[in-house]
Amino acid sequence: MSKMKQFRYSRFILTFISILLIFLIIVISSIMSQHYEMLDEIHHDTQRELELIGTFSREALLSKDYASIEQFLNQWAREHEEILEMKAVAPNGFVLVHYKSYSESSSSLHLKQLVTFENRKLLDLEMTKDMSPAQSSMVRFSLPLIIGSIILTIVIGIVLWYAMKRLALLPMERELSIREQAERKFRLLLESAPDAMIYIDSKGKILMINAQTELMFGYNRNELVGQDIEKLVPESLRSKHIESRNKYSLKPAARPMGSDIELFGVTKKGRVFPVDISLSPIETEDGLFILSAVRDITERIKAAEKIRRNYNFQTAISAILSISLEAIPIEEQLQRILDSILSIPGLSLESTGCIYLVDDQPDVLVMKANRGLPESIKLGCEKVPFDTCLCGGAAASGKVIFAQCTDNRHDHNKKHEDDYLHSHYCIPIMSGDTSLGVINLVVKEGHERSTDEEDLLKSIASTLAVTIEHNHADMDRQKLQEQLAQAEKMSALGRLTANVAHEIRNPLTLIGGFARKLDKSIPEGAQDKEFSGIIIAEVERLEKILRNVLTYSREAPIKSEQSDIAQILHDSLNPFMDKFTKLSIQVKESLNNLPAVYVDRDQVMEVFNNLLANAMDSMPEGGTLTISAEHTIVKEKDYLVVSFADSGEGIANDKMKMIFEPFYTTKIIGQGTGLGLPISKKIMEDHKGFIKVDSSMEKGTTFSLYFPVNGRKA
């Protein structure tokens, strides 16, 4: 039997028993009332008797007839068997009469009477009367009545019970059974619901919950039943929820889920989460009740956000692919790609970041594009070696790195702590196991690391890797085309040189020879002497040009042998030292512990001489020439790098691409042939190495020679 049914059944039984008891009490009360009336009448009669005795005693005392009083009182007591004791006491304490019966009684009545005359006390009368006979008589009279009343009550109760059971109890039991089944079905439906079901009254008190509610909010039933529904609402929203609930109670109506109202719940542990709620008002005899279905929509919101974010991601990747197909410089491509990344909706990014690429120098990141970075960061982070700071760590490990502004791994927090504290993602741009660069993106303050964001950024990095490789392929193709064009040019130049050599060299030799003989026959101081000197100088210059042209155009064999680069450099440097001293050029060397390499000593010395001559010409007013060497790896190959860094005028950007072109020179006519650097470049390539140049106007130029270290001949 359900609690509701037990309650109603018990209430009915108690009501019925109460009615019978009230009836029985009324009957017994009537009998007892009659009993007490009889006792009261006996009391009054006895009191009147005592008053009569007192009147007689007063008259006898006034006439001083004490014997009559004694005789009268004793006789009265003996004649009335119910008198147990009679006593008369004078004011002075003298006992005039004291009668006492030897009978025992279970009930007695004791009365006193003061006899006075003109406010003067004459006598105290006391009488104790046996009430047992009267009591027995009354019991004999009342007991049948009480028993009869009880029997009558039982008979009436049986009749009434039968009638009530037929007319009221059985229908009520059937109704309660129906309600019990309905309640059982309701509870079963409630428990089997996939949502949290909460049954509340119009005042917001929780009456019933299901198991899903316990799982969702972390409370057990005992902790919620009887509590306000606002216990499941975040504290900041409770006052607003009470207002909304009161308005709903005035005009209750069914409200389905998905009403586009932002609602939130809070668990026992304080976790706030978004919910969707449907409300169903239930009108009953006991008033308005509301059944609420609560659904946790955290995953739904995450899924929608993920779909929206994926759409934004795909849009961004499409934009990046579109940019990568445009015929624009790689720096411009990267800048536009960075702008596209920073503008992706849904990413917790500031409008700040940069893109690094691995340029000519291996294991060194070079900033190619940036947005919103302070000048101190641009300058301090222009180049980042692998395994240095977070960006270098991401490039070396090939893994995404996320760092808060307080991360100890972030070296620039120490360098620029007062200028730029920030948190960011470092996403390596990978091609297989090779790191091509790093995307550095600054995130909003307080943002936590997100796997979804990382997956997106890795997808963008992969797309960017394709763009970079495509650009590298274009550059390689362009270089190959340039090399083919250069080879054709050199082939044509070689053919021209072979044809012209005999036509020019022999006449030039004759002119030089006759000019020198003529110069010897002209006396000093004559004007013709000056003319002959000019002819001889120009012939020598033409011979030098012709010799360089022949050197550049012909395939000279390399006589490589294991050599000490430092020694070759010193041999090349010695002839220049006097000139450097006169021009106030200071030479600094750092050439310790250099490995031996296989080179053609004479050709390498010619390269050194060309670079030393160029350095001297770039510092006419003095400066510093720093010569250093180090071991490095480029594309998994070992190289010995010899660098010549001057503090001269530098080379303009528009001239950098032309310095290795034959016959191009920045020197005045007569001081350079324009073949020194092209010959140096050719010699380095013949040695399976290469030459690099880095220059800044007014800061100087650095030429770096890369000699392969392979332990065998070139």
Image (tube, rainbow, N blue to C red):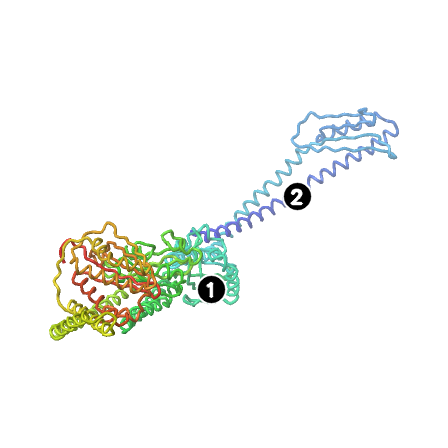
Please rate how many residues cluster around mark 2, counting C-alpha atoms within 10 Å: few if below 14, some from 14 to 19, many from 20. some
Q: Nearer the viewer, residue 362 or 217?
A: 362
Q: Which residue is mark 1?
A: 281
- Find numbered disc 2 in the image and state the secondary structure of the residue it sits on: helix
- Find numbered disc 1 in the image and state the secondary structure of the residue it sits on: strand
Q: Which residue is mark 2?
A: 34
Instruction: Please count the marks in the image.
Output: 2
> Image height check: is 108 above or below 211?
above
Q: Amino acid at mark 2?
A: Gln
Answer with the quarter of the image where residue 540 lies.
bottom left
Q: Amino acid at mark 1?
A: Pro
Answer with the quarter of the image where residue 54 lies.
top right
> Image height check: is 141 above or below 677?
above
Could you say where residue 591 lies in the image, as x and y percent from the top left? Answer: 25, 52
Answer with the quarter of the image where residue 108 lies.
top right
Identify the mark nearer the N-term, 1 or 2. Answer: 2
Q: Is residue 513 left or right of residue 142?
A: left
In contact (CB < 8 Å): disc 1 and disc 2: no
Q: Nearer the viewer, residue 438 or 300?
A: 438
Asked if one can make out residue 367 in the rendered structure from this viewpoint, the answer is no
Please rate how many residues cluster around mark 1, counting C-alpha atoms within 10 Å: few if below 14, some from 14 to 19, many from 20. many
Q: Nearer the viewer, residue 260 or 469?
A: 469
Could you say where residue 356 lies in the image, as x and y percent from the top left? Answer: 31, 62
